[in-house]
Image (cartoon, rainbow, N blue to C red):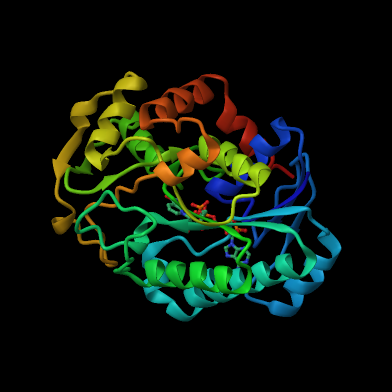
Amino acid sequence: MRLLITGVSGLLGINTAWEALQAGHEVIGWVNRRMLPRAPFPTRSIDLTDATATAAAWDEAKPEAVIHCAALANLDECERNPQYAYALNAEAAGRLAALAKRDGVAFVHISTDAVFDGKRGGYTENDTPNPLSIYARSKLMGEERVLAANPQAFVARVNLFGWSLSGRRSLAEWFLNNLRAGKQMRGFTDVFFCPLLANHLARLLFDALERGLHGLYHLVAADCMSKYEFGVLLARRFGLDASLIKPSSVENSGLSAARAHNLTLRADKFAAAVNHTIPTIEDGVEEFHRQALSRYPENLREWLNP
Ligand SMILES: NC(=O)c1ccc[n+]([C@@H]2O[C@H](COP(=O)([O-])OP(=O)(O)OC[C@H]3O[C@@H](n4cnc5c(N)ncnc54)[C@H](OP(=O)(O)O)[C@@H]3O)[C@@H](O)[C@H]2O)c1
């Protein structure tokens, strides 16, 4: 399939592009500013908050399917620039979904576990969101805009980790960078999540496309843990000193955007729809480690070279 990936220079986008190529799909990548001159697919720079430029680029791309990964996904940036957060995370997403509807193109929209307030955890698609931050509110509005413009869209609430082009984007990389530098760091014992490896997530998104799923789905790992436990799991798998990770509470973290405590979601609806099991966090960490051994992150970063 001819697959357009927006935000292809981001954490999810780059790993999705890799997986799409492995699966034999034709990839068209859109970035904002970070071009990928050596990527084995064409990339185009576009500001998705510009409706005219988006429509023109869309007409040229002629995709058969879209995975919309572009977003302002930095919580503190969203607090500083709410207008831009809403313009990109909500309005631009709705516009793209409408273009896809107009042309009969399959559309996957990526949302977040952070639409919930994290007071309870174990959320299903039937639970009522209560976003705590500008980021989360703009993402919830994005879901609404996408499904209003295009009821055939597949909207996935996700959490993920993996190798990024900057080497700093994902929580797993943050833990590893500190561990490898022998630096102490805090690991939250009171924040729970269910992150999927970006590559696992990408493969599940292809499943969704192949089966023509539409509507809202939770797409997270089959199990959940605290961010502290996640750091320790990584440290052990990579043979690093887990005692550098100090158990701590998010309440004393000084982070400016409000953080929810229990963002565990249930992916049963998706598992039933695709009729197979979803990888666990440990499965993801195993593959993340194998990727490091096979120089996967270095190979991805080659795509940035002029
Ligand atoms: N990472 C997580 O832990 C996490 C958790 C839950 C949900 N999500 C969701 O997953 C999706 C992917 O997140 P990510 O972590 O991969 O994000 P990311 O690494 O921050 O990447 C964001 C991407 O969006 C592009 N972009 C930014 N502003 C743009 C604009 N105005 N026009 C066009 N493109 C623009 C960026 O391009 P440049 O590189 O050129 O700037 C980049 O490719 C997002 O929807 C996010 O909300 C992520």
Instruction: Determine the residue positioned at 46% across, 60% down.
Output: 73
Image spot of residue 142 (x, y percent) = 51, 70
Residue 230 in view, yes or no:
yes
Q: Residue 173: which quarter of the image?
A: top left
Question: In the image, what residue occupies the spot 31% across and 53% down?
Answer: 123
Q: Is residue 240 left or right of residue 188?
A: right
Q: Is residue 238 left or right of residue 22?
A: left
- At which x and y percent is residue 114? 35, 59
Residue 304 in view, yes or no: no
Image quarter where the C terminus lies is top right
Residue occupying image coordinates x 29% and y 67%: 257
The quadrant of the picture occupied by the N terminus is top right
* Image location (x, y in percent) of residue 113: 37, 55
Examine the rendered structure and indicate whether residue 93 appears above or below residue 235.
below
Question: Looking at the image, how many numbered discs can be counted on the residues?
Answer: 0
Of 145 and 134, nearer the camera is: 145
In front of the other: 151 or 173:
151
Left or right of 211? Residue 297 is left
* Left or right: residue 143 compared with residue 58: left
In the displayed structure, 284 sits above or below 90; it is above
**Rendering coords of residue 40 (x, y %):** 77, 39
Q: Image point 50% across, 20% down: which residue?
A: 290
